[in-house]
C-alpha cells in the first residue's frame, strides 16, 4: 500500500508549489493512474514516493511505514521504477541493464540469468537476439520495454511507471498497453502509473487521479469520473479535448 | 647526406638509440602512470568535494605554467640530486593537470538522467560512482591520460639536461656540438614516439569499449580490438626490456661487482670543450687505472655540474678558475692567474671538500668577438673601441654571460658598455648568429675553434676585466682518498694543452664533425700519454 497525506512540494522555498496538498492512497494490487498535462507535478509525485525528492511537507507511507524511516537504498530496491527518460545505462548490455537490481541484491548469477530471460520474453524481446546488445542498438520502443523489464527484475512489491509508453507510435503503444494489462493480471503489483494520455489512463487505471497545476482535481474510478466530474477542469477535460472517444 | 650515409649513421648509433628510447619511454611511462595514480583519485575527490575544486585546480594549473627547465632546475636544488628522480617528479607534475581535469570533466558530464536512474534503482553512492559514473567518464579520462603521455614524451626530452637520459641526450649533445644530425637523431624518434604513444593509448581506449554486435566472433574487427588492447601493454614491456638491457649495463654491473664498485663518474657542462675534456679524463682513467668510468656528460650549466659534484652525484669535472671564483664563490675577480687558482683551491677544500688539480694549460676566458670585416672597417681592436657605437649594436650572449658578474654586468660597469639589444643564445648557436649577421657581437670563448674558422676577431680586453679562466679537473676529496692514484693520473694533463691546441681540438669536433672519442684517443696517443 502507498499512502500520501497532505503532500506539498516547492522547489523555490515556498514561492510556488509543484505539488499542493496532495492526499491519496493506492491499495495493495491496485493500479492508480496519475493523469495530468505537462508540468502538473506527476513526476515529482513519483520521485517523492521513492525519495529521489523529499516533500516540503506531509507524510508518505509505503507498506504502512513512513518512507523517511526507511534506508533510502532499501526502499528503492523494493520499488521498481520505470523512468520517464528511460534511463538505461548506456555502457551496459540489455542483459546487464535488466540484471542490475538483482545483482545489487546479491542474487546468484544463475537465478539472475534465469530471471533476465524470463523478463525479456515477457516484454517481447527474446534474450537470444537482444541480451548482448547495447541500449543504443535498440529502437526507442524496445528501450522502453527494457526499462519495464528492469523495473520488474527483482520482483518488487511496488511499481512506479512514469509515462513508460510516452514516445511511442499509436500501434506499438497499444501493443504495450495490452502487455501491461496482461502483466497486471499475472503479477498483482501495486502500481502508480503516470500518463498525460486520457485514453491510456482509462484503459489501465483501476482508479484515476487527475492533477492540475499541482492540485488534485478528482480521484476515483473511470465510472466516478465520467459520471460525476468533481470540477469544471475535469468536465472540460472529457468534453472539450476528447469528444466522443470515451463512451 | 645520401640515403646510404643516413642508414650507416643510424645503424652505427643503434645501440645508443635503443638505450635512449628505452630511457625515454621509461621516463614518460612511469611519470604518466604515477600521474594517473594521483590524478584520477584527485579528480574524483574534487568532483565530490566542490570547495576543494578551485584551490586544487589552481595549484595544479600553476604548476603547469612553470617553464619545464625552471621546474627541473628547481627540483634539482630541492632534492639535491641529478638524474632520473627529479625528472620523474617534474614529468609527473606536468601530467597531473590533464588527467585530473579530464577526470573531473568526465565525471561531471555524465548525464544527470542516467545518474538519477542509478540512484532510483537503489545503488549506494559508491556503487553509483564505480558502476555508472566512472565507466561512463572513462573515455574522457583516457583522453586526458593520452594528452598527458604525449606532452610527456615532449617534455622528457628536456630531462637529459639534468642527466636523466632519454632521447633528449642526442638533442642536447647535438646542440652542444652544433651537430644537426645528432639533434635529428633525438628529435625524430621523439616525434615518432609521441605519435606511437598517442596511437596506442587511443587504440587501448578503443579496445576497452564494450563489444558491439558488429564485433562478431572471429571477425577481423574483433581481432583488431584484442590487438589494440595489447598494444600499449606491449610497448610498456618492450620499453622495460629496453631499459633493463642497456648495452653495457649488464657487463658494467658485472665489472662493478668484480672491482668492488670502483666507479668514477665524470660530468661535463653542455659545450664542446667540456665534452672533449671530459672524454680525455675518462679515457686516461680507463687506461691508466682499473676504475670504471661513468660518463654523465652534458649536464646543463655550471650550477648543475657544481651542485652534482657537491652532492656526490658526480666525482669529477673540468672547471675554470674564473668561473669557480666569481660564479660559485661569489668572490671579486682576481686578475692574477696563479693567485686565482690558489684562492679557489683553498676555498673549495674548505667549503666543498673538493680539490683543484693541475690546470690543463689554456685560458678559456671570454672574448668579445666581432666579424673580421666589421673590425677592419671600424678599426676595432680593443673592447674600449666599441663604447661609442654600442647603442647601435646587437649583442648575442649565452644566458650565463648575460647574468654573471664577470660577464655583461661587469662589462657595463668597467667599460661603460651598453648594447642596444641583447639576446640570449645557446653557446652553439651564438657563432652562427654573428656570422649570419643576426647579431654584431658575441661573448666567444677564447679557445673556440670557430673564431678562426668563421673569420671572427676577438677584441683585446684592454682594461683587464675578464678574469683568468684556466681549466682544471675538480674532484671530490672523498674519491681522491679512496683512489689516490687518480690524482697522479690526472696531473698528467698539467700544462698539456695551450690555447691554440684547444682551439684546434674544438674545431675538429665543432667544425669538422669528428667523433669526440676517436679524436681524443688520437690526440692523447700523439702526446704519448695513452
Ligand atoms: N528539480 C526541479 N527544480 C525546480 N523545479 C522543478 C524540478 N523538477 C520539477 N520542477 C518543476 O515542478 C513542476 C512539476 O514538474 P514535474 O516534472 O513533476 O511535471 P510532470 O507532471 O512530470 O510533467 P511532464 O508530463 O512534462 O513530465 C514543473 O513546473 C517543473 O518545472
Ligand atoms: Mg514527468
Image (cartoon, coloured by chain):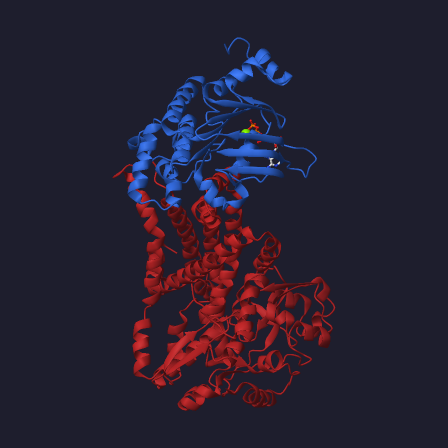
Chain colours: A blue, B red
Figure label count: 0
Q: Position of residue B66 (x, y in %)?
A: 59, 61
Residue A70 seen in render: yes
Left or right: where A10 falls relative to B220: right
Residue found at the far front of this picture: A64
Please report the residue visible at 42 percent of the width from the left and 76 percent of the height from the top. B279
Left or right: where A4 falls relative to A190: right
Above-or-below relation of B307 to B489? above
Q: Where is residue B71 in the image (x, y as percent from the top left)?
A: 56, 65
Could you say which is closer to the camera, residue B97 or residue A244? Answer: A244
Please report the residue visible at 65 percent of the width from the left and 83 percent of the height from the top. B333
Q: Quadrant of residue B238?
A: bottom left
Q: In which quarter of the image is ligand 2?
A: top right
Left or right: where A206 falls relative to B324: left
Above-or-below relation of B413 to B338? above
Residue B488 seen in render: no
Q: In which quarter of the image is residue A169?
A: top left
Q: Position of residue B58 (x, y in %)?
A: 61, 56
Could you say which is closer to the camera, residue A7 or residue A111? Answer: A7
Could you say which is closer to the camera, residue B327 or residue B482? Answer: B482
Residue found at the far left of this picture: B218
Q: Where is residue B132 in the image (x, y as percent from the top left)?
A: 45, 44
Amino acid at each position: 500500500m502507498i499512502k500520501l497525506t497532505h503532500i506539498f512540494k516547492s522547489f523555490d522555498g515556498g514561492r510556488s508549489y509543484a505539488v499542493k496538498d496532495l492526499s491519496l492512497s493506492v491499495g495493495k494490487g491496485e493500479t492508480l493512474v496519475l493523469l495530468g498535462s505537462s508540468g502538473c507535478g506527476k513526476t515529482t509525485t513519483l520521485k517523492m514516493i521513492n525519495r529521489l525528492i523529499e516533500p516540503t511537507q506531509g507524510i508518505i507511507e509505503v507498506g504502512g511505514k513512513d518512507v523517511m524511516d526507511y534506508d533510502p537504498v532499501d526502499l528503492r530496491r523494493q520499488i521498481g521504477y520505470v523512468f520517464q527518460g528511460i534511463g538505461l545505462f548506456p555502457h551496459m548490455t540489455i542483459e546487464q541493464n535488466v540484471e542490475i537490481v538483482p545483482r545489487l541484491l546479491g542474487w546468484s548469477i544463475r537465478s539472475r540469468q534465469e530471471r533476465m530471460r524470463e523478463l525479456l520474453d515477457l516484454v517481447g524481446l527474446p534474450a537470444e537476439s537482444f541480451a548482448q546488445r547495447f541500449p543504443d542498438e535498440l529502437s526507442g520502443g524496445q528501450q522502453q520495454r527494457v526499462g519495464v523489464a528492469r523495473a520488474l527484475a527483482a520482483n518488487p512489491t511496488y511499481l512506479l511507471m512514469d509515462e513508460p509508453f510516452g514516445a511511442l507510435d499509436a500501434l506499438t503503444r497499444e501493443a504495450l498497453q495490452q502487455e501491461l494489462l496482461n502483466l497486471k493480471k499475472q503479477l498483482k503489483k501495486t502500481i502508480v502509473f503516470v500518463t498525460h494520455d486520457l485514453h491510456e489512463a482509462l484503459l489501465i487505471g483501476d482508479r484515476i487521479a487527475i492533477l492540475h497545476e499541482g492540485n488534485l482535481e478528482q480521484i476515483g474510478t473511470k465510472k466516478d469520473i465520467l459520471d460525476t466530474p468533481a470540477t469544471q477542469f475535469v468536465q472540460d477535460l472529457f468534453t472539450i479535448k476528447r469528444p466522443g472517444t470515451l463512451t | 647526406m645520401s640515403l646510404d650515409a643516413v642508414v650507416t649513421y643510424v645503424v652505427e648509433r643503434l645501440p645508443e638509440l635503443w638505450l635512449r628510447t628505452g630511457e625515454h619511454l621509461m621516463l614518460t611511462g612511469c611519470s604518466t602512470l604515477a600521474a594517473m595514480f594521483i590524478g584520477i583519485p584527485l579528480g574524483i575527490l574534487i568532483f565530490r568535494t566542490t570547495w576543494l575544486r578551485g584551490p586544487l585546480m589552481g595549484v595544479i594549473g600553476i604548476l603547469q605554467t612553470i617553464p619545464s627547465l625552471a621546474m627541473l632546475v628547481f627540483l634539482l636544488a630541492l632534492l639535491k640530486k641529478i638524474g632520473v628522480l627529479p625528472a620523474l617528479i617534474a614529468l609527473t607534475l606536468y601530467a597531473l593537470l590533464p588527467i585530473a581535469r579530464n577526470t573531473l570533466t568526465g565525471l561531471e558530464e555524465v548525464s544527470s538522467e542516467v545518474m538519477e536512474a542509478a540512484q532510483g534503482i537503489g545503488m549506494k553512492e559508491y556503487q553509483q560512482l564505480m558502476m555508472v559514473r566512472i565507466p561512463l567518464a572513462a573515455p574522457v579520462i583516457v583522453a586526458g591520460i593520452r594528452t598527458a603521455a604525449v606532452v610527456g614524451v615532449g617534455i622528457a626530452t628536456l630531462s637529459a639536461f639534468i642527466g636523466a637520459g632519454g632521447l633528449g641526450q642526442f638533442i642536447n649533445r647535438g646542440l652542444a656540438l652544433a651537430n644537426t644530425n645528432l639533434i635529428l637523431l633525438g628529435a625524430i624518434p621523439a616525434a615518432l614516439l609521441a605519435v606511437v604513444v598517442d596511437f596506442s593509448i587511443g587504440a587501448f581506449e578503443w579496445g576497452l569499449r564494450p563489444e558491439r554486435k558488429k564485433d562478431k566472433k572471429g571477425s577481423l574487427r574483433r581481432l583488431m580490438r584484442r590487438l589494440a588492447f595489447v598494444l600499449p601493454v606491449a610497448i610498456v614491456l618492450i620499453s622495460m626490456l629496453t631499459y633493463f638491457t642497456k648495452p653495457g649495463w649488464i657487463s658494467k654491473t658485472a665489472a662493478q661487482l668484480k672491482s668492488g664498485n670502483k666507479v668514477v663518474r665524470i660530468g661535463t657542462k653542455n659545450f664542446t670543450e667540456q665534452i672533449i675534456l671530459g672524454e680525455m679524463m675518462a679515457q686516461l682513467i680507463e687506461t691508466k687505472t682499473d676504475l670504471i668510468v661513468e660518463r654523465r656528460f652534458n649536464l646543463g650549466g655550471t650550477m648543475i655540474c657544481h651542485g652534482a659534484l657537491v652532492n656526490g652525484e658526480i666525482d669529477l669535472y673540468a672547471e675554470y678558475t674564473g668561473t669557480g671564483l666569481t660564479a660559485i664563490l661569489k668572490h671579486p675577480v682576481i686578475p692574477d692567474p696563479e693567485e686565482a687558482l690558489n684562492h679557489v683551491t683553498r676555498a673549495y677544500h674548505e667549503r666543498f671538500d673538493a680539490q683543484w688539480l693541475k690546470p690543463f694549460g689554456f685560458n678559456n676566458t671570454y672574448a668579445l668577438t666581432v666579424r673580421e670585416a666589421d673590425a677592419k672597417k671600424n678599426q676595432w681592436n680593443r673592447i674600449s673601441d666599441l663604447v661609442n657605437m654600442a647603442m647601435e649594436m646587437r649583442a648575442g650572449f649565452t644566458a650565463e654571460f648575460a647574468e654573471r658578474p664577470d660577464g655583461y654586468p661587469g662589462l657595463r660597469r668597467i667599460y661603460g658598455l651598453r648594447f642596444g639589444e641583447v639576446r640570449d643564445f645557446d653557446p652553439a648557436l651564438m657563432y652562427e648568429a654573428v656570422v649570419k649577421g643576426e647579431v654584431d657581437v658575441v661573448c666567444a670563448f677564447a679557445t673556440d675553434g670557430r673564431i678562426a674558422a668563421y673569420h671572427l676577431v676577438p677584441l683585446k680586453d684592454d682594461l683587464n676585466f675578464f678574469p683568468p679562466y684556466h681549466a682544471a679537473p675538480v674532484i671530490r676529496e672523498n674519491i681522491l682518498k679512496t683512489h689516490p692514484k687518480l690524482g697522479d693520473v690526472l696531473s698528467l694533463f698539467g700544462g698539456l694543452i695551450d690555447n691554440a691546441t684547444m682551439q684546434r681540438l674544438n674545431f675538429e669536433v665543432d667544425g669538422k664533425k669528428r667523433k669526440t672519442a676517436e679524436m681524443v684517443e688520437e690526440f692523447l696517443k700523439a702526446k704519448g700519454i695513452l
